[in-house]
Image: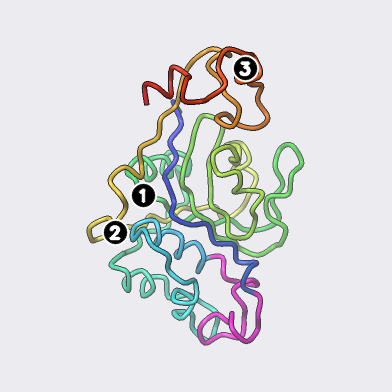
Amino acid sequence: VDGKVLLTMYEYVNQGSYSNPKTDLRGKSNETIKNSGCLDCSVDMIVMYYEWQHVDIHDISDFVASNAQLDTGGALAAHNMTQGTSTYGNFKQGVIDEINAGRPCIIHIRGWWTSGDGRTLHDTENGHFMVGRGYDSNGLYVYDPGCRANTEPIDTVYIPWDDWNNVTDLYYRPVYFNGTIAKPENSEKNISILGDSISTYEGYIPSDYSVFYPGGGGISNVQDTWWMQVI
């Protein structure tokens, strides 16, 4: 894996924000979005990616039947989208191919999941859905509706590739948009600067990295850096 590719998502949806048993039930079921709406949230985030506007999570959850199963095809069709086949093999390359094609994909895992460094990635025995939306040589960047710690900060947090070998029932599912993408033309354009330490400026590099300017003297405004002048 060479380089880093991150799709620019419109909005992150955390299922934990929807726990009200009166207003946050999933369609015709008796379950709240918080308890079992990870697929609803994942579909919603992908829909917003393509339509580039807020779509209320309840609009997606309305497609949930009394058995608490989401009619994913119906929810996607309402937004001019279709889903592909769930693919169990060749996970890493398959997800990379989807992201390279500009398509965030649905990812499924099952069971308790702990990272190689001891972090809890999923804390129940149930199945769980999330969105694959970026990658680099270190791992996969996701929008996990059940865990902010797996998601944010969105440009630096990833799940290492090796950790995907430690979970069961792992598959990815493509989602295809059949219309005209509504995102602004420049929304996918990202610029990375390759330079030495004196190219760094506070606030424009991850917070846990050392910076040279403005504390190093000579430049007190980010607009005076060589790379900002180029941009």
**Residue that numbered label 1 is attached to:** 103
Query: What is the magenta range?
Result: 19-38
Residue at 60% from the left image edge and 31% from the top image edge:
206
From the top left corner, tell me how far across and down residue 65 is, in percent.
49, 83
**Residue that numbered label 3 is attached to:** 212
Callout 1, which amino acid?
A: Arg
Callout 3, which amino acid?
A: Phe
Q: CA distance from mark 2 to mark 3?
A: 44 Å
Q: Is residue 46 magenta?
A: no
From the top left corner, tell me how far across and down residue 26 is, in percent.
54, 80
Mark 3 Cα shell of 10 Å, populated few (<14), some (14-19), many (≥20): some
Q: Secondary structure under badge 3?
A: loop
- Residue 56 sits above or below residue 11 on the image: below
- Whether label 2 touches label 1, CB < 8 Å: yes
* Left or right position of 187 against 119: left
**Occupied quadrant, residue 219:** top right
**Occupied quadrant, residue 101:** top left
